[in-house]
Image: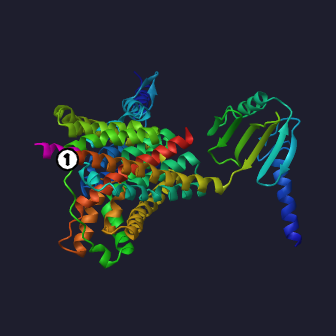
Amino acid sequence: MRKVCVITLLFIAITTLAYPSDAFLGVTLIPGATIIHQDNQRLEFNVNTTYDEAVGYYRELFKNSEHVKITDRGSQTYIEDHSNRDWHSVSISKLENGQIKIVILKDNWTWILGTLVLRFLAVFAVLLVLYLAMTLTGVIVSRMVSTHASNR
Amino acid sequence: MTFQEVVFMIEGILQTTGLFSLTWKMAVMWAISGFFLYLAIARKYEPLLLLPIGFGIFLVNFPLVPLMGFSDGKPHLLQVFYSYGLEWELIPCIIFLGLGAMTDFGPLIANPKMLLVGAGAQLGVFVTFTGCVLAGFTLREAASVGIIGGADGPTTIYLTQALAPHLLGANALAAYSYMAMVPLIQPPIMRLMTSDSERKIRMKQLRVVSQAEKILYPIVACGVIAILVPAVIPLMGMFMLGNLMKESGVVKRLSDTAENALMNIVTIFLGVSVGATMEAEKFLSAKPLFIFTLGLLDFAVCTMGGILTVKIMNLFLKEKINPLIGSAGVSAVPMSARVSQAIGLQADRKNYLLMHAIGPNLAGVIGSAAAAGMFIAMFN
């Protein structure tokens, strides 16, 4: 039991040292952030800056980071990591009440497996649409050919 | 001239040779090159590609050779081939033009259900992706390794160049090596996954496809793919253009050039450029070895995926499909279709599956391109 406690304490100490207190999984928090929810998978916080400032802050933060994809979705900016970092995504949203909410998610298998299954099904969908298009074209052409033959 | 000066002069001349810069890693690469040359020349495994690839590996693994890189800002010979051919993603697209001009889509048009088999055979691509992520590859690297199982060389090169260019040599080599080994890899899996009675299923002869349908097919297919998977249209667009040139019959000179002269020229540049990316310092690491291991698993799972898809389809179909043609869903045209035919003949001497297997085979080309498009769209 003592060993477990020591290892746990060591782990906490190392992770605390590895990431500064104003960071989650290596992603720095905007100064003055108010944490709404935190567990080991997810951190949600509000900031009292404008949406553009918040987006600008994280764009600057990840400016030189390789394999980071930033997607602008109107009132939400979604930052996604495609390498092996501890975090998976940072989403910055402008809520209806004007507040800016930022969510940092830990790298997780749910996302990877989810996206893979969906993309595998999407390959089926593409070929299914092609199948339907080919069947339809085949029917039309066959009718045209038989009409043409009977007219002769 | 003193004796000392003569010695210095000789030493100076010797320094300009590669003698003092040889490393053991280069010797390992010569052995690898020798292995691929052996496969190509003695065993005749994919010689059109493995020969130039093998020789490309040999060429670049000597010290001081001005082949890959730049001198005074000017690119070296193979660097030019690589930059314009692969970095610009020109060669895979031209290869697809030639492939299109060589392809008869008749069996697929006659039985379009086979398109679904081509989709099912991409299972390994996604399974390998997961394996690579588990092994610590980045998502981009994982996607580029996964596509090897699609058994489509140009697609593998196209996707790898787009997502993980540093893995180009290893991925291309794994893809072409395993494509060459399809007759060795697939039969045990096919036997394991099918019963004797399934292997004996005879399929109805395919209907005759009219010329009009063959002309319409590349236009319709291109339109559908351009709307649904635009990321991969450089490949599929050229593929369908080549096929339209062939089927229309009005540009015989062009289709003849695309499938013969142009294809041959580009194949030389492709092979030697891929080989040239495999310099010892870059290639001799754990990743390429891992890629080769996972590539094999990838091929196996893709074969299983194709067979399983046929079996699932058979649950709903009145006229059953011989599951042996499911393995042809990995593209490897026409090698995997021939394997289906061979295994089918072993079970029933009068069961000719070749034309039936060409359908899923061509569907596999489209399926692997669609999978590649999904990955490109995911990252870009």
What chain letter is assigned to the residue under label 1?
Answer: B
**Residue at image point 35% right, 63% down:** B326
Classify residue B81 as left or right of residue A27: left
The foreground one among B70 and A30 is: A30
User: Which residue bears the numbered disc 1?
Assistant: B210
Q: Which residues are magenta?
A: A144-152
Determine the secondary structure under disc 1: loop
Q: Residue furthest left?
A: A152
From what the image shows, is residue B113 above or below residue B270? below
Asked if one can make out residue B326 in the rendered structure from this viewpoint, the answer is: yes
> Between residues B354 and B283, which one lies in front from this camera angle?
B354
Which of the 4 quarters of the picture holds residue B266? top left
Please state if B60 lies on the left or on the right of A25 as rendered. left
**Other residues around mark 1 within 10 Å, as few (<14) / some (14–19) / many (≥20):** some
Q: Is residue B85 magenta?
A: no
* Relative to B252, B81 lies left or right: right
What kind of residue is marked 1?
Ser
Q: Position of residue B143 (x, y in %)?
A: 51, 49
Please identify the quarter of the rendering in which residue A90 is found: top right
Query: What scheme was used to colour the molecule?
Result: rainbow
Residue drawn at (44%, 34%) of the image = B87
- B203 up-or-down from B155: above or below: below
Task: Determine if residue B61 is in view.
Answer: no
